């Protein structure tokens, strides 16, 4: 799971048929999933990926 800045995040789910331009929405679930992020690490940008190890090799 990527590290996200602290806060609440929600995901909507939509059931529809048709194409992207011409569709009929049958049902829209607002806030179908709500995630609360508690972070003790510093995050820069929208999200961070935890680094288990970093290796720098200089080969000649």
Image (spheres, rainbow, N blue to C red):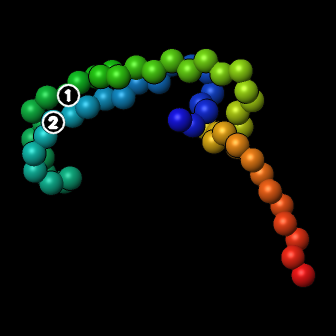
Q: Where is residue 18 drawn, in percent x and y? A: 10, 50
Q: Where is residue 10 drawn, in percent x and y? A: 41, 24
Is residue 26 at all visible to an observer of this figure?
A: yes
Question: Which mark is drawn over residue 28?
Answer: 1
Q: Where is residue 39 drawn, in percent x and y? A: 66, 22
Residue position marked by numbered label 2 in the rendering: 15
Instruction: Specify the quadrant of the image occupied by residue 27.
Output: top left
Q: Are marks 2 and 1 in contact (CB under 8 Å)?
A: yes
Location of residue 38 with respect to 16 vertically, above or below: above
Is residue 45 at all visible to an observer of this figure?
A: no
**As drawn, is 32 to the left or to the right of 3?**
left
Give the spatial CA distance, label 2 vs label 1. 6 Å
Q: Residue at x 75, y 47 (%)?
A: 53
Q: Residue at x 71, y 37 (%)?
A: 44
Camera-nearest residue between 23 and 12? 12
Location of residue 47 with respect to 39 vertically, above or below: below
Count the numbered circles shown.
Answer: 2
Circle 1 residues within 10 Å: few <14, some 14–19, many ≥20: few
């Amino acid at each position: 799971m990527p590290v996200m800045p602290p806060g609440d995040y929600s995901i909507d789910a939509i059931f529809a048929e048709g194409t992207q331009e011409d569709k009929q929405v049958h049902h829209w679930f607002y806030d179908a999933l709500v995630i609360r992020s508690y972070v003790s690490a510093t995050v820069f940008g929208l999200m961070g990926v935890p680094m288990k190890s970093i290796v720098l090799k200089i080969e000649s």
